[in-house]
Image (tube, helix red, strand yellow):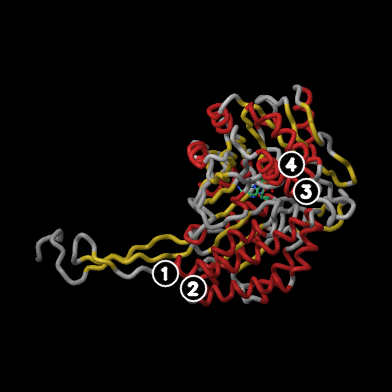
C-alpha cells in the first residue's frame, strides 16, 4: 500500500480529474473482514427464504435510487445508454437470483447407500467471507454478479470495485443499509493494494479483470489455499460463413463489437469471413459502423461513449498505429478523437495480418479487424489460434453447420446468428477456456453453488459395521 489516502477520479468525457476516491487502508480492510467473519454465522443461520427477502429489498433499494446510480455511472464511464441497461439489468438480475436461490441450496433428504445400513445426506456450507474484485467496464453489474449469489448462499461480502469507477459506492452502501444488508456486505475502495488486502481477508475470491492482474490474484489465492474464480480478458472471434444472412450478420456484429465502445469482455474483436461473401459482408458492416455516432457532446445522443480508462487510450492508439504501419486499412474510423476525453469511432480494419497487435491482443475498444478466409476449416483454425477462450459467434443459415462449427470453437459461450448473447442470457452455464479464466460458471444455478462447499453427513443407521475390529 502507498502512503496516499486518496486517488484522483477522472471524468472520461472531459479527461479532467473532478473528485477524490478514498483509499481504504489495509488495516481497515482486515478489520472489516474480521467483522464480516463474525457476522456470517448469524446470516447463514437465517433461512434461505429470509435471505432472499433481503435481496428483493436490495433490488427495491436500487430501484429507488436509480437516478443516483445512473449519475454515478455516467460520471465514471461517460456513457448513458449502457448505464441505463446496466442499472436496470442489475436490478432484474438480483430479483432473478433471489427467486432461483432457494431451490439451488436445499439440503437433500438422506438416501440409502450401496451399503444399505449407511445413509448419506448432502448438505452445503457457505464460505464465510467472499472477496469480490471488479473492473471498470460494467462497474455495478460486475460487482453484484458475484456478490448477490454469494449473499444468497449465506456468505458475507467484502467488495472492491475498480478505482476507475467507484462513484456508485456510497449509494450502494446506502441501499445495502436500507435492505438490512449493511452488516454482511462491506465495500472498500482503492487500487491494487486494497485488492491485495481483500485477498488476505477473504476465504474465497471472485475476480473480474485482466489476465495480467488475474495471474497475480490467482497466485496470491494459491498461497493462501483459497479458491479463486477468475473471469479475465478475451479476443472473441466471429465466423461469417458463406451461407450466412449477410445483413443480419453485419447488424449483429456492429452491435457485438461496438456496444459500450467495445469495452466489454465478450466484445467481438475479430471476424473471419469466407471469401465468397467477404465483399458483401464488409460493405454491409461498413454501412452499419458508419451510421453509428459518437455520444458527444450530449451523452444521450449517439451510440459510442468515450474510452473509459485513461490507461486504454495509449494502448488503442498504439494498436492502430502498429496495424497501419504493417499495412492495415481503416474503412471507417481509424483515428482516436480528442474532446478532452478520448473517443474511438467504430473502426473496421481490413488487410490485417496475424502479426498485428490488433489481431493477437485484447483491444477492448470499438476496433474490428476483418479477415478473409478460404473455408470453414481455416476460419475455425484461426479463431482458435489465440491464448483466449471467452466466447465466440458463428453466422450460418444451416443449423447443422452451426452445430458442427460451434462445437469446434475453444470458448465457453458461442452465440449462433447473434453476438455477445452471454451478456444477455444468464441461465445457460458457461466457463472460460484458456487464459480467459478459471472457476465455476457464474451463469445458471451454478452461479449460486460456487459459494458453498459440499458436506456429506454419513449416517450409520444402527448396525455394527462389518469392517470394524472384532468386538472386544
Ligand atoms: P484490471 O485487471 O486492471 O483491474 C481489475 C481489478 O483488479 C480492479 O479493481 C483493480 O483495482 C484490481 N487490482 C489491480 N491490481 C491488483 C492486485 N495486484 N491484486 C488485487 N487486485 C488488483 O482490469 P480492468 O482494466 O479494470 O478491466 C478490464 C479487463 O477486465 C479486460 O481485460 C476485460 O476483458 C476484463 N473483463 C473480463 C470479464 C469477464 O467476465 N471475463 C468481464 C469484464 C471485464
Q: Residue at x 49, y 62 (%)?
A: 127
Asked if residue 17 is positioned above or below residue 115 in the image, the reply reads above
First of labels 4, 3 by sequence position = 3
First of labels 2, 4 by sequence position = 2
Label 1 element class: loop
Asked if residue 8 is positioned above or below residue 169 in the image, the reply reads above
Circle 4 residues within 10 Å: few <14, some 14–19, many ≥20: many
Q: Quadrant of residue 161?
A: bottom right
What is the x, y in percent for residue 220?
Answer: 56, 47
Q: Residue at x 62, y 29 (%)?
A: 274
From mark 3 to mark 1, how far is it between C-alphas?
A: 42 Å
Q: Are marks 2 and 1 in contact (CB under 8 Å)?
A: yes
Q: Quadrant of the C terminus?
A: bottom left
What is the x, y in percent for residue 324?
Answer: 78, 26
Label 2 element class: helix
Circle 2 residues within 10 Å: few <14, some 14–19, many ≥20: many
- Looking at the image, which is closer to me, 329 or 167? 329
Q: Are marks 4 and 3 in contact (CB under 8 Å)?
A: no
The residue singled out by tag 2 in the image is: 48
The residue singled out by tag 4 in the image is: 365
First of labels 1, 4 by sequence position = 1
- Looking at the image, which is closer to me, 9 or 255? 255
Could you tell me how many numbered marks the image carries? 4
The residue singled out by tag 3 in the image is: 308
First of labels 3, 1 by sequence position = 1
From mark 2 to mark 3, how far is it between C-alphas?
A: 38 Å
Circle 1 residues within 10 Å: few <14, some 14–19, many ≥20: few
From mark 2 to mark 4, how far is it between C-alphas?
A: 41 Å
- Looking at the image, which is closer to me, 254 or 341? 254
Amino acid at each position: 500500500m502507498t502512503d496516499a489516502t486518496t486517488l484522483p477520479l477522472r471524468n472520461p468525457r472531459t479527461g479532467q480529474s473532478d473528485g477524490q476516491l478514498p483509499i481504504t487502508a489495509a488495516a481497515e480492510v482486515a478489520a472489516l473482514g474480521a467483522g464480516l467473519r463474525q457476522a456470517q454465522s448469524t446470516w447463514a443461520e437465517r433461512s434461505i427464504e429470509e435471505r432472499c427477502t433481503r435481496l428483493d429489498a436490495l433490488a427495491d433499494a436500487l430501484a429507488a435510487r436509480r437516478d443516483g446510480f445512473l449519475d454515478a455511472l455516467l460520471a465514471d464511464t461517460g456513457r448513458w445508454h449502457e448505464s441505463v441497461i446496466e442499472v436496470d439489468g442489475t436490478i432484474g438480475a438480483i430479483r432473478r437470483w433471489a427467486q432461483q436461490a432457494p431451490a439451488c441450496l436445499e439440503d437433500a433428504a438422506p438416501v440409502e447407500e450401496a451399503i444399505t445400513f449407511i445413509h448419506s445426506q448432502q448438505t452445503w456450507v457457505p464460505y464465510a467471507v467472499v472477496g469480490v474484485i471488479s473492473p471498470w467496464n460494467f462497474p455495478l453489474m460486475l460487482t453484484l454478479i458475484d456478490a448477490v449469489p454469494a449473499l444468497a448462499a449465506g456468505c458475507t461480502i467484502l467488495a472492491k470495485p475498480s478505482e476507475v469507477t467507484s462513484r456508485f459506492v456510497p449509494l450502494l452502501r446506502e441501499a445495502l443499509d436500507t435492505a438490512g444488508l449493511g452488516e454482511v456486505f462491506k465495500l472498500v475502495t482503492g487500487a491494487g493494494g486494497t485488492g491485495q488486502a481483500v485477498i488476505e481477508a477473504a476465504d474465497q475470491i471472485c475476480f473480474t479483470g485482466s489476465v495480467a492482474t488475474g495471474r497475480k490474484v490467482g497466485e496470491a489465492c494459491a498461497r493462501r489455499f483459497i479458491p479463486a474464480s477468475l473471469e479475465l480478458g478475451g479476443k472473441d472471434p466471429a465466423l461469417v460463413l458463406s451461407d450466412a444472412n449477410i445483413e443480419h450478420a453485419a447488424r449483429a456484429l456492429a452491435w457485438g463489437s461496438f456496444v459500450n465502445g467495445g469495452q466489454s469482455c465478450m466484445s467481438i474483436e475479430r471476424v473471419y469471413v469466407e471469401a465468397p461473401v467477404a465483399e458483401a459482408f464488409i460493405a454491409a458492416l461498413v454501412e452499419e459502423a458508419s451510421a453509428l455516432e459518437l455520444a458527444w457532446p450530449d451523452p444521450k445522443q449517439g451510440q459510442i461513449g468515450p474510452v473509459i480508462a485513461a490507461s486504454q487510450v495509449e494502448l488503442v492508439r498504439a494498436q492502430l498505429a502498429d496495424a497501419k504501419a504493417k499495412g492495415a486499412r481503416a474503412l471507417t474510423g481509424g483515428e482516436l478523437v480528442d474532446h478532452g476525453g478520448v473517443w474511438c469511432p467504430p473502426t473496421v480494419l481490413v488487410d490485417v495480418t496475424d502479426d498485428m497487435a490488433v489481431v493477437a491482443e485484447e483491444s477492448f475498444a470499438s476496433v474490428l479487424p476483418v479477415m478473409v478466409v478460404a473455408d470453414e476449416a481455416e476460419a475455425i483454425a484461426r479463431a482458435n489460434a489465440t491464448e483466449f477462450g471467452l466466447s465466440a459467434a458463428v453466422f450460418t443459415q444451416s443449423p447443422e453447420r452451426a452445430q458442427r462449427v460451434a462445437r469446434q470453437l475453444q470458448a465457453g459461450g458461442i452465440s449462433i446468428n447473434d453476438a455477445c448473447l452471454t451478456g444477455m442470457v444468464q441461465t445457460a452455464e458457461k466457463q472460460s477456456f484458456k487464459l480467459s479464466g478459471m472457476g465455476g460458471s457464474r451463469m445458471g444455478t451454478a452461479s449460486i453453488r460456487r459459494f458453498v462447499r459440499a458436506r456429506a453427513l454419513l449416517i450409520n443407521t444402527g448396525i455394527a459395521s462389518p469392517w470394524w475390529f472384532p468386538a472386544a
